[in-house]
Image (cartoon, coloured by chain):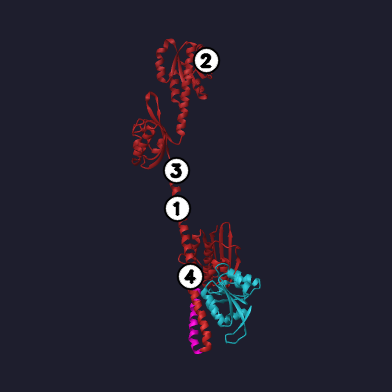
Chain colours: A red, B cyan
Amino acid sequence: MPEPGADILIVAGSELVVSTVRTPLEDAGHRVRAVADGPSALTELNRQLPDVVMAEWDLSGVDSLGLCRAVRLDPELCGTHVIVMTSAARTARAAEALEAGADDYLAIPVERSELLARVRTGRRTAQLRASEARLRALMANVPGAIYRCAPDRDWTMELISDEIERISGYPSGDFIDSEVRTFASIIHPEDRERVEAAVFEACAAARPFVLEYRIQRADGDSRWVLERGQLVHGTNGRTWLDGAIFDISAQREAERERRKREAEQARVAELRASRARIIEAADAARRRIERDLHDGAQQRFTAVALQLRLLISRLQRSAPDVALPVEEALDELQRAIDELRELARGIHPALLSERGLVRAVEALISRLPMSVKLREAPAQRLPQAVEAGLYYVIAETLTNACKHADAGAVSIAIGRADGRAWVEVADDGVGGATASEGSGLGGLKDRVEALDGRLTVLSPPGGGTTVRAEVACA
Amino acid sequence: MTTHGRDCFGHNDVVQPTVLIVDDHATFRRSARLLLEAEGYAVVGEAEDGRSALSEAESLEPDIVLLDVFLPDLDGFEVASQLTGRGLAVVVLTSSRDGRDFGALVAESGARGFIPKSDLCGASLAAVVGS
C-alpha cells in the first residue's frame, strides 16, 4: 500500500527551483505549498506545520541559516524536517546548514528518485519526532514518574519524567546518569535492601514487579510510592529497567485512616456489645435472684406462716394464753415476708418476665399515688433485654416524678417502629431534671446506650419533664 | 362438689367447701392443705401445674380452686380464665408476690380475688369467696 502523501513547504525565491522540485513531488502524490521568502515561510509554518520544509539557500529576508535556527528553537516548529537545497557548486557549505539545525541538504538539480527518497526519509523523521513529542506529552501528564534506568544498585537513570520532582522534591535532571544523586539514595534506608532484593529477584525471574516503599524527599518528609517495572532488552545487548513510580502517600494515609476508623468502629461496637452483655447478665442475675428468693426463702417463710396460723387456730381452742406469743411471732414473720417481697420486687419485677412490659408498667402505675396514664402501648411483647431497659427507664422516671417533680399527672407512651422501640414519659412537674453522671437518669442513659439507643431529657424549669428513650429493637 | 364431715369445732355433718390447691411448691401445698382442712375445708386434690389443674378441676369439681399465679407451664391468669369461663369453680389466686404487682390481671382473669400466700387462712379464703 503506498504511503499517503506528505505535506511539504518549499521556500524558494527562484521559480526554477520551485518548478524543479514541485512537479515531481506533486506527481508523487505529495501536497506542496510554496513561498518565496523567509517571513512568508515562518507564517506558513505557524499556520500549518508541514512534514518537510525544503528551503533554498540564501533566501531574501531570512537566510536559510536563520530559518533553520528559528525552526529548531521553536518547540511548536521543531518537529518538522528541514532540507536545505543548494546548487551543486555550493555543497561545501552544507555542513554549515546542518550545523544550524537543518536535517539534510540536497544539491539542485536532483534526480527525481533521490528527491522522493529524501522526502520520504524526512517525512519519517517528522513522524518519529511527532510521536516522540506525543510520548513526552503523555509522560508529562501521567501522574507518576516514568523512567528507564540501568539495573544496577544505584538505579542509574537514563530518563525519568519531571513528575519525580513533584514526588521527591528533586529535579529529574539530578538522577539522569546519577548526575547529582542516585535514585537509590532517596529510597528510605529501612526499605532499600528490600527494594533491591525484590527488583533483582523479579529481573532474574524475568517477570514484572510491583513494590511499595518509602522515599525520603528533599524537604525531609517520607512519602510512600508504588513502583511498577520490568526488565527490557535494548539495543547493543543492553538491558534496562522500564517502569513508573507513583506517589501513593495520600492513598496510604486514607487507607490507614479507614483502617483506624474501622478498628475504632469495631472497638465501639465491641464496647457496646460488651456493655449490653454486662447489662443482660446483670438483668439475668436479678431475675435469678428474685426467682431464688421466691422459690426459696419466700416459700419457706410462707410455709412457716401457714403452720403458725394452724398452730394458733389450735392453741386458741386448747390454750389461748399460749396463742398470744405465737400470734406475735406470726406478725413478726409477716413483716419479714413483706420486706422480703418488697426486696424481691425491687430486684426484679416478676411480672415483667412473665407478662411483659405493658403489664408490668400497668402494675407499677397502679401502686403510684398519682395520676399516670398509659396512652400508647404495643400489642406484642418486645425482646427481653429491650423490655427490661425500657421498664427501668419508666420506673426511674416515675420515681423521679413522684419524689422530685411535684407532678400532678404523668403520661406514658410505648411504641415500636422501624427496628426501634421507644418510650416517652412526660410529667407536668417543676422540670429542671438532667441526665448527669451519677444521677438516676445518668444511669439510665448508660443502660439505654448499651441497647444502641439514646436517652433524651427535656426538662425546662417550670415546664415539666419529658424523658424519651429509643433503643434498637430487631 | 361439697363434702360432709366435722367442722373445726368437731361438729359432724357440716357442709365443707371443697378445695383444689394448685401450686408448684409442695411445701406450700402441704401447709395450705393442713391449714384449710383444720379450718373446715375439704382439700380434695392438689395439682402442681396449669394443665393438671384444668384436668383435676374437671374431674374433682371442687367448689374453690386456690391457684398460684406463676406456674411452670401455663400462666395462672390463663388457667383462671379457662376455669371460670367454663364455670368449673370459684378461683382464688394466690402468690407469695404482692397482689398489687398484678394490676388489673386478677379481675380480668375472672378470679374472685387474690390472697397473698402468707395471709392464707380459712377466714381470708371465706372472705374472698364470699365477696
From the viewer's perspective, tell me whether residue A192 is left or right of residue A41.
left
The amino acid at mark 2 is: Leu
Whether residue A77 is in magenta: the answer is no
**Which of disc 3 and disc 1 is earlier in sequence?**
3
The location of residue B5, given as percent across then percent down, is 60, 83
The C terminus of chain A is located in which quarter?
bottom right
- The lab-note entry on whether marks 1 and 3 share a chain reads yes
Q: Is residue B20 above or below residue A239?
A: below
The amino acid at mark 4 is: Asp
What's the distance in space between the residues labelled 2 and 1, CA to CA?
76 Å
What's the distance in space between the residues labelled 4 and 1, CA to CA?
41 Å
What's the distance in space between the residues labelled 1 and 3, CA to CA?
19 Å
Tag 4–tag 3 contact (CB < 8 Å): no
Q: Which residue is mark 4?
A: A292
Tag 4–tag 1 contact (CB < 8 Å): no
The crowd level at tag 3 (other Cα within 10 Å; few <14, some 14-19, many 20+) is few
**Which of disc 4 and disc 2 is earlier in sequence?**
2
The amino acid at mark 1 is: Glu
Q: Chain of mark 4?
A: A
**Which of disc 1 and disc 2 is earlier in sequence?**
2
Q: Which residue is mark 1?
A: A264
Nearest to the eye among marks 2 and 4: give it.
4
Q: Which residue is mark 2?
A: A25
